[in-house]
Amino acid sequence: MLRYMTAGESHGRALVTIVEGLPAGVPVDLAAIDRDLARRQTGHGRGGRMKIERDRVEALSGIRHGKTLGSPVALLVENRDWLNWTEVMSPLPVEAYTDPRAAQKVRTRPRPGHADLVGALKYGHADLRNVLERASARETAVRVAVGSLAKQYLAPFGIRVAGYVRSIGPVEAQVPDGPDLDEIVARAEASPVRCPDADASARMVAEIDAAKRDGDSLGGVVEVVAAGLPPGLGSHVHFDRKLDGALGAALLSIQAAKGVEIGDGFAAARRRGSQVHDEIGWSPDRGYFRYSNRLGGLEGGMTNGMDLVVRVAFKPIATLYKPLRSVEIDTHAEAVAGIERSDVCAVPAAAVIAECVTAFEIARFVAEKFGGDSLDEALRNYRGYMEQISRR
């Protein structure tokens, strides 16, 4: 079983994770993980925090001489901003703040759309900082590190995963079916909002600038494509073994995610079956294939050999610089919501996060399907399976 757990607060000392279940012998390029961490920090609309952090991964265990050992892999991403929060976020008791700025960082006015209020009610906190520090999307930095590691595990199987922006606010990109994934990725990475449509990219930047002037925020939709998948990842026999179910759960766990669709998703619900289902063909060189990919590469909870296409809708960030109505949790007096340093739009970063979360879920199902205590053993199993299905 391939799994991971994260720990850490937004302004704590560091974010950490333990990844369990990777086979021995997986080549690991820590610099490649750093590049994905840097991608997560970019994008028009990001806030001041990204000017402080310079995210780098540190491997604490499970990797030796550039390859996994088969034991748990522990990774750490340092929070540079911790130096400005040592008293506020101290794990030791603090009787009284000596830094006058520290008292100003107590939070008692919950933000609509955030975990602030419900988390305080659930865990009995009087200071909302006890909630928002862990609920913060800063946690996704270490999830990107995990997903970047998963992409390196998938590479020897010929599987590639990439994410980009389809829409921000009312602006929707046009992504033609013609260009291959490499071309789409190149266009997206050249865009300030990680969008492969240059015209839409410029209009998205303008929308973000307008929202910033208004003290508001923007959400959007990102698309993730996974290419090179073998048919048969996942299963039809139990709900918790279906790949689409696992992807939905994992992607909806990303902060601010409010919807997931696979392939044509909700649009398919408005069409007839003849306009939705992908007709099947066969040829000696390709074996079974589909003439279209409206179902996004998944049928019956399993990959069908076509590209996986999944989209995630992200709501606007909850922190507004022209705050909405709220109340003081200690007095119940009317107030405006608290302001915590934040982004105007984090959708370009969300594309990287969704990419990495998707990569880990695919890696989980690859590990389940092909097993192996070592990468070589897993690849032998993979090649045997691919040869087997090629004879059908």
Image (cartoon, helix red, strand yellow):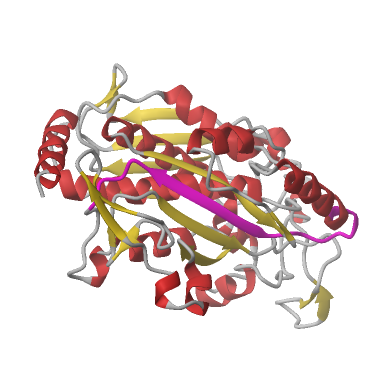
Q: Outermost residue toward the right? A: 213
Instruction: Say which of 215 and 116 sits in front.
Output: 215
Q: Position of residue 227 (x, y in %)?
A: 38, 42
Q: Can residue 214 be found in the magenta stretch? A: yes
Instruction: Say which of 122 and 276 sits in front.
Output: 276
Q: Is residue 272 visible?
A: yes
Q: Quadrant of residue 23?
A: top left
Q: Can residue 179 be found in the magenta stretch? A: no
Q: Position of residue 105 (x, y in %)?
A: 74, 55
Q: Position of residue 133 (x, y in %)?
A: 59, 55
Give the residue at x 49% y 49%.
Answer: 224
Looking at the image, residue 340 lies above or below residue 382: below
Looking at the image, residue 52 lies above or below residue 128: above
Give the residue at x 66% y 59%.
Answer: 220
Looking at the image, residue 311 lies above or below residue 364: below
Give the residue at x 76% y 76%.
Answer: 328
Instruction: Say which of 73 and 82 sits in front.
Output: 73
Q: Please give the range of residues in magenta.
A: 212-231
